[in-house]
Amino acid sequence: MAMGDDISASASGVVRTAGNVNNYNWNINGNQVVIDHGNNFCTLYNHMSSVAVKVGQSVTRGQYLGGAGATGAADGVHLHWDTVQCSGHYPIGKFGSYEYPNGFYAGQRITSRNSVPAVWNPSIPSRGDLVAVDSAGVLWNYPANGSGAFEPKHQIGPGWTNAKTVWTIDWNSDGVNDIVTQWSDGILRFYPGRSTGGFYAYQKIGASWNGWEIAPGKLRNTDKYPGMIAKELSTGLLYYYPNASGNWLTTDSRIEIGHGWTNLSINVMDFNYDGNLDVLALNPADDLYAYFGNGAGGFSGNRKVGAGWAFEAIAPTFGFIGSGSRGLQGKALNGDVFYYPVTTTGFGDRFRSAHGFGPFQLANSQNL
């Protein structure tokens, strides 16, 4: 980046800071522009050599803001670009800029991408939504309309090709759906959802999970946060890993909750409407079993609840056909997706809820 290079607006909004006007720390920021994009979400641009906009001016994405520089506390020409809360300019995500979350060292020259994704990352408002990774590794959300159908899809973001499983769950119990991902290299990452849309920077919550099949959920009703139900592939042992902090899994206090699960594929939901999380198990003969949780980290019994479940993916869903409803979305080999309502007496009549999902990997499923 050279002195005077064009700096442009990442997205449309209203200018709140320009140069030294409303700039409360010029000695650090230098010439600064702050753009308010609504919902207490702002972008800032520091150390500029010149500023071409004024406070109160409306700008559009890509509009020229001024030139790159080294004003304020800068050791060289660069742009410090960040996403912040408009109130207090607290970074959204980790400290430092988006590209350099751990900050900078003295004399480091950096180049900002000076842009935001082409599609504003939405949060996942409902666990009735169908979340899926396409063949190009792009993660999409298909919002449920609450009446048994989906609204137009929204892009969450690219770069999910190596995701082994993707789960939508309120991992930190703040009332907003998050994403927990098991990557093919064994890393577990937690992407906290923002109430205003999108996600904060991911946090690593586990490693060496290559040899495991997982499903997040709260198996003990007394736990503050959901934990992880996990099957060790090499032994067939089933464990529950608590999540004591709303972040990293507590591996040293795991609980063995079953054995002989080698040939069973797992998922979780409250199948019998008793308020306790149950474990669903699919065997190689495509029989579906429910292991009924007792709310204390164990099971009260099990029974066969279905046969002929020859699907590539089976994903629990909540609120798809109305508030309080629950069911399973099954993706067939031809890419059709079928919804099976779960009632207090078993399954209701299925119907096709989507089609064309052949090359997609569904979230909230093992993708068999």
Image (cartoon, rainbow, N blue to C red):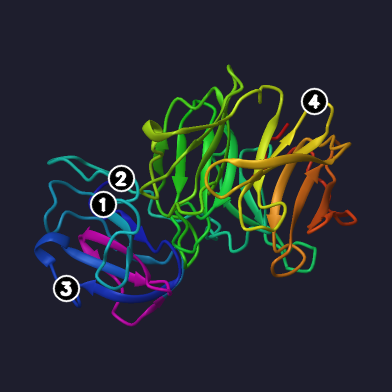
Is 130 or 140 nearer to us in this picture?
Answer: 130
Decide: is 64 above or below 239: below
* Most distant residue in the top direction: 234
The amino acid type, in three-letter code, at marker 2 is Thr
Decide: is 260 above or below 368: above
Looking at the rendered structure, the secondary structure element under dot 1 is loop
Decide: is 281 above or below 176: above
Picture quadrant of residue 119: bottom right
* Most distant residue in the front direction: 300
List x then y, in percent, for residue 175.
48, 64
Name the N-terminal-most of marks 2 and 1: 1
Q: Which mark is residue 95?
A: 1
Is 286 or 5 nearer to us in this picture?
Answer: 286
List x then y, in percent, for residue 199.
46, 55
The amino acid type, in three-letter code, at marker 4 is Pro
What residue sits 23% from the left and 66% below the top?
A: 32
What residue sits 75% from the left and 61% below the top?
A: 150
Instruction: Specify the segment rendered in magenta.
Output: 35-58
Name the N-terminal-most of marks 2 and 3: 3
Cα separation, mark 2 vs mark 3, equals 23 Å
Q: Residue 76: within the magenta?
A: no
Is 42 or 2 nearer to us in this picture?
Answer: 42
What residue sits 31% from the left and 57% below the top?
A: 82
Q: Residues within 10 Å of mark 4 (few under 14, many from 20)?
A: few
List x then y, in percent, for residue 155.
61, 54
The amino acid type, in three-letter code, at marker 3 is Asn
Picture quadrant of residue 229: top right
Which residue matches tag 4?
Answer: 284
Q: Residues within 10 Å of mark 2 (few under 14, many from 20)?
A: some
Q: Which mark is residue 111?
A: 2
